[in-house]
Image (tube, grey):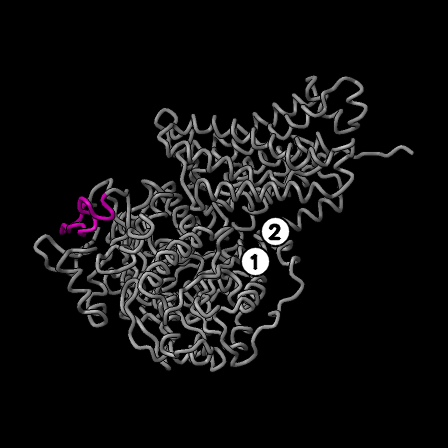
Amino acid sequence: MSRRQFLQWAGHAGLAAAAAAGAPALLGSCAYGHDGPPGGAGPSGGGGGGSSDTLLVGVVAPFSGVGSFLGDIVDRSLDAAVRQVNSTGGVGGRKVELVERDTGIDPSAGPRVYADLVSKGVVGILWCGAVGFGQALPQVRRDHMPLVAVFNDPFSSGHLYPEGGEAGRSVFQILLPDRYAKTVLARYASTDRGYRTAAYMYDSLLDPDATARARFEEAFGAAGIEVAGVESFSLLDSDYGPQLQRLRERRPHVLYVDGLAANTAGVVSQLHDLGAPYVDTPTARAAGTGGDWHPHVFGSPPGSGDKSWVELAGDNARVGTVTAWHLGGLVYLPSFAIGGWMRKFLGREPTGGEESAPDGLAALLAGVRKAGSTDRDKVVRGMEEAGPLTFASLEFGFTPERHLARIPDEVAIVTMERAALGPAPTEPPYALGREWSPGQVFATTPAGPTQLVRPTLEANRRAHPALVEQILAEGYGTQCTKRNGALTPECKVH
Amino acid sequence: MTDLVQVIVSTATIGSALALVALGYSLVFSATGIVNFAQGPLLVVAGYGAYAVTRAGLPVALALLLAVAGTAAAGAVVEVVALRPLRRDGADPAAGVGWVLTTFAAGLVAVDMVRITVDAAPHALAPVVGSVFGWSVWRVAGVAVTPTDVSIVVVTLAAVTGVDVAMSRTARGRALRAVAQDREAAALMGVDTTTVVTCAFAAAGALAAVAAVLLAPKVFVRLENGLLLGLEAFVAAVLGGLGSARGALAGGYAVAAVSAVVRTLSPSGSRYEFVAVFALFLVTLAVRPSGLFGERTVEKV
């Protein structure tokens, strides 16, 4: 999941890349003399899509640079998905072929890469967390190019159709929006944990306009939580001492770290060194009444959604650190196909985030099937009218009024559990989910994500009743399940 | 008081690591008159190399030794592939700009090799010195000081002193400076100039490895470390005066101090960190173009 990375921020990464790219970016951009597409199709353009026996799909991802681990996930998950599609006859008898392009860490490469894909005749594009999305968007709109934002978040920044305007109608989004994540986490902090103050640490290099910060203040304010401090760091920082010293004076109950895995790990490690690690909810709350400061760390989905931050922080990573994710991202559930495809075609397990790009591909191909053509406008209408889809993980779909795959009721809260250390002591006790059992996916790993069912149980059940019943019945990720199987509000207090 | 101590601790630890890398830049510059832009990527090679060793179950101390040896070798390879071809027919690489591209390209290749052979994810390394007689963290005015912090400072001071002494008082050090001043004359005096230059690149690689492994508990092993630490260390080296060990130390601490002060002064400080560092850089160069400790070269006509 962390892999879906700076994705949410990727569209804002101009400053980061400008600072980080340096000469390679300059050299890269100098290799191309123009930003516009060479002979790109005009408005309501025509189709292309490859030869008569192949259907070309463009993929833009960070295959190099800071986010290349995300590119690796995109590459292998789409590899498995395309093999699956082609092994079942392709699309109307045409084999699907990917055309992968990399923008590295250079936002200005977005328009160039887009133009290159247009010149190859792709039927549509999956934009998978690569920078340059915002820069390429005007051309995408001009060309009406079907595009799925797999790991980019135009919804949260107000750029997704319909909020973003008719011109962007060809853009669809798979990624769980940051807006939804922060709303659910704020509600959890207030209602389930009784926290009243929170502080926010964010990456000013990746969020130069502070749009994610504004979403934090809006969400936590709406939940009745006072924002006790806002601190910034840069993507590449490793020393959070000055920021944590300031926050210690304000003693917020919650510390929300909006960064990547290394940032979350760095902050919790330095909290430990300061003698302020998270202990449990009562201790976190006691800071407001004269107790020592031990904030409950909330992480962003990219920074705390998978086990990598735990591996970086080692023993300093405390069980109970939470973030938000979506039900379809629980790729270890046996009913989700992506795990089986990866084992079948690649001989490997998914690590998190592998469902997203294949589901984006499925949406695009469904549009082509529905349209019976590769004409861009027809494909866009096809994607809107294809109805519910079930491909790599959970059922999803788009409509003419909704270009976002996720809905608020699909958001689940995820925490990290430590297999190597055994279940953390809690009162009352809870049982680790079945995925930790011998032979299951997390049994051999030191840490992994586990879904906290109860805080979002009713919402999740409304959205996907059959799946939630399966999770409860089979015990996947149910840290709120007491040993007798009942779910109680007080579970997972530790 | 807490703020002051925090600035001192942040400056000492991060500044020391920058100084080690900056010292590598300086060594290569001393021997060749060029800047090795692969120095930052060598941090990545060292970090991921050490991680691969610990992943195999070997202790981190051994990983440090192997990383030093391996990255020294990688540094020598950079010299062979990126610089030596530019010296064909007795040409002076420093007279052109080809070395900018070749050393930069060598760095890019090195990072991509790491990505392909190890992976691209960040990793943790255990501290080389985890605790000393049971001491694992000391809090001074509420600011944490760990054995890792102390070890970085001590090793850096030792390395800078050692290089400084070696450069001024040993035959090899004098040979290195002689090669930088006049390669042809040094060769006529019996100095094996090729070996001297290769050794400078290797030593720079070794210093990068020490910085990468010692600092890993704080910054982790990340692909982007090469870019950030490499760039900041380059600024530190130029600020202190390329070619000067003491300058590398002063430059490292100056860059780290500016960052720490800016972040201590304001919650939004990180927004202005780079601006402040580069402002200091520009002002210093405007006043002292050769850097704080750089030697002014006078061309006699």
Magenta region: which residues? A425-443
Query: Chain letter of disc 2?
Result: A
Q: Mark 2 points at which residue?
A: A24
Contact (Cβ within 8 Å) of mark 1 with mark 2: yes
**Rendered residue at 16%/62% (across/down):** A470
Dot 1: few (<14), some (14–19), or many (≥20) neighbours within 10 Å?
Answer: many
Tell me: A174 left or right of A210.
left
Give yes or no for residue A439 being in the magenta stretch: yes
Q: Residue A106 carries which label?
A: 1
- Vertically, is A333 above or below A56? above
Q: Where is residue A482? Give x, y as percent.
A: 12, 54
Tell me: A455 left or right of B11.
left
- Depth check: give the residue in front, A45 or B115: A45
Quadrant where the image shows the N terminus of chain A: bottom left
The dominant secondary structure in magenta is: loop
Give yes or no for residue A113 being in the magenta stretch: no
- Depth check: give the residue in front, A72 or A194: A72
Q: Where is residue A190? Give x, y as percent.
A: 27, 64
Q: Measure how far apart labels 1 and 2 are at the Cα level.
A: 9 Å
Q: Where is residue A59? Give x, y as percent.
A: 46, 62
Dot 2: few (<14), some (14–19), or many (≥20) neighbours within 10 Å?
Answer: some
Q: Quadrant of residue B294?
A: top right
- Whether residue B36 appears in this view of the structure is yes
- Vertically, is B266 above or below B228? below
- Depth check: give the residue in front, B205 or A47: A47
